Image (cartoon, grey):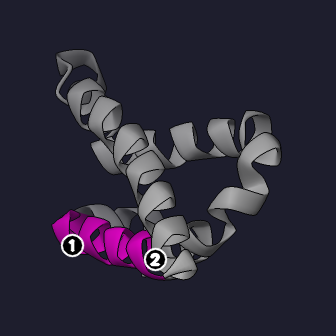
Amino acid sequence: MQRFHQLRSCLALTGALACPSIQLGKLGWLQFNGISALTLAIVLGVVVGNTVYPRIGAMADVGLTFSKANLLRLGTIFMACARPSRTSATWAGPV
C-alpha cells in the first residue's frame, strides 16, 4: 500500500508537469518551430528534477522510477511514430 501511495503522488507530479506542457505546446510559435508538448514536458522535467526534486526525492522515488522506465519510453515511441519519415531521413544525413 505504501508503494501505491508513492506511485500515486509522483504520477500526480507527472500530470502537473504534463498539463502546462500540453497547453504551451498549443502555442503557434512553438508549433511553427516544431517544439512539441512532449519536448516541453521533458525540458520542464529536467528543470524540476534539478531544482525541486532533491527536496522531495525520498517521497517520489518509486513513482519517478516508474515514470522514467515506462512513461518516458512510451512518449519517445509516440514521438518517433508521429515524426514524418522524410524528417527522420533528413536528420540522419545523406544515405
The reply, left or right, for residue 84 in relation to residue 1 is left
Q: In the depicted view, which residue is nearer to us: 12 or 34?
A: 12
Q: Quadrant of the C terminus?
A: bottom left
Q: Main secondary structure of the magenta part?
A: helix
80 sits to left or right of 1: left
**Residue 93 seen anywhere in this rendered image of the structure:** no
Residue 61 lies in quadrant: bottom right
Q: Are marks 1 and 2 in contact (CB under 8 Å)?
A: no
Single out the mark in the foreground, 1 or 2.
2
First along the sequence among labels 1 and 2: 2
Q: Which residue is mark 1?
A: 85
Q: Is residue 28 magenta?
A: no
Residue occupying the far right of the picture: 54
Query: From the viewer's perspective, is residue 90 above or below residue 26?
Result: below
> What amino acid is found at the position of numbered circle 2 in the picture?
Phe
Instruction: Give amino acid for label 1.
Output: Ser
View extreme (front): residue = 1
State which region is magenta.
70-86
Residue shown at the point (18%, 65%) measured from the top left: 82
Q: Residue at x 56, y 77 (%)?
A: 2
Mark 1 vs mark 2, CA separation in Å: 40 Å
- Could you say which disc has been placed on residue 4 in the image? 2
Question: Relative to 36, is 24 above or below?
Answer: above
Secondary structure at badge 2 equals helix
Of residue 25 and residue 13, the one placed in the foreground of this image is: 13
Residue 1 against residue 10 in the figure, above or below: below
Question: Image point 43% across, 44% down: which residue?
Answer: 41
Q: Residues within 10 Å of mark 1 (few under 14, many from 20)?
A: few
Can you say whether 40 is above or below 66 in the image?
above
Horizontal relation, residue 91 to residue 53: left or right = left
Task: Tell me where residue 79 appears, x and y as whole percent.
Answer: 29, 65
